[in-house]
Image (cartoon, helix red, strand yellow):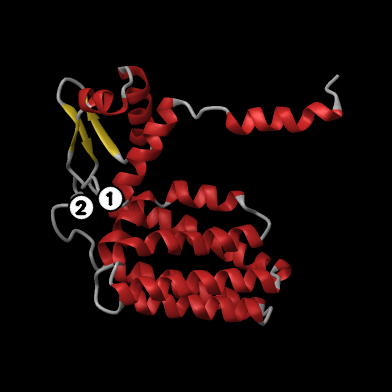
Amino acid sequence: MIAEADIPRLLRVSVERPVPKAEQIYDLLRQAIVRLRMVPGAVISEKALCLEYGVSRTPVREALKRLADEDLVDVFPHSGTYVSKISFEVAEEGFVIRRALEIESIRRAVRFVTDDDIARLDHLIAGMHDILNRGALHEYIEVDDAFHAAIAGISRYPRIWKFINLAKAHLDRMRQLSAPLPGHLAEVTEQHTAIVRALERRNAGQAELAMTIHLEASFAVMSAMDGDGEYFKRKDA
């Protein structure tokens, strides 16, 4: 039997347990791909990754296998591994999943939101305005995701954001491409503000409508980029 006095120590050991190398490499590569630091079509060298992270090929291949399962890399035996091009169809599927889960999330959040939650969301919106004022548009998606993840947390279904995050990788790459469009992120920020004000009023109908308008308007902007440039996968491919 575990003594009560040992529980904090056991929890501490659990928290401090090292993250496996394969998972670390997966997380770093996934973020680089989603944020377009690794552009669609870029060559991925297993040997270079092994040298960079000081590991054998096994954890690198495990990480690449997970990314391939998410359609973020293409692995061609005896040819090479490449960052996948953006698939509009996969991005659209991610949008449909995201919209369904976020609407449920905002509907529940109205029931549980507190004044402290509203203050935290307003703080994130202030961060968005700061990013716009500085013109650091590449930073926006991080705060945007924190905003939506916070709403998922308020809904008391925090795992919803985990599922959304897995589904929206191709969508996120389109979000990153759309960031520099004139006025787009300023409009997104106003939509976020409308969501918070509806939550503040505890009005479920207004909150759901504000979230729906936000998600569909953003996707409409991204949809206009379908097939635009070398980063997109051809529909007949």
Q: Which residue is mark 1?
A: 87
The residues tagged by marks 1 and 2 sit, at their Cα atoms, a distance apart of 6 Å
| Quadrant in which residue 171 is drawn | bottom left
**Neighbourhood count class around disc 1 (C-alpha, 10 Å): few under 14, some 14–19, many 20 upward:** many
Residue 217 appears in the picture as rendered: no
Rendered location of residue 15, percent (x, y): 62, 34
Q: Residue at x 36, y 70 (%)?
A: 131
SS at mark 1 in the image: loop
Q: Residue at x 35, y 45 (%)?
A: 31
- In the image shown, does 60 or 202 lie closer to the viewer? 60
Rendered location of residue 119, percent (x, y): 61, 73
Cβ–Cβ below 8 Å for labels 1 and 2? yes
- In the image shown, does 40 or 193 lie closer to the viewer? 193
Query: Quick check: 130 above or below 230?
Result: below
Query: Quick check: 192 above or below 8?
Result: below
| Circle number at residue 232 | 2
- In the image shown, does 118 or 152 lie closer to the viewer? 118
Residue 157 appears in the picture as rendered: yes
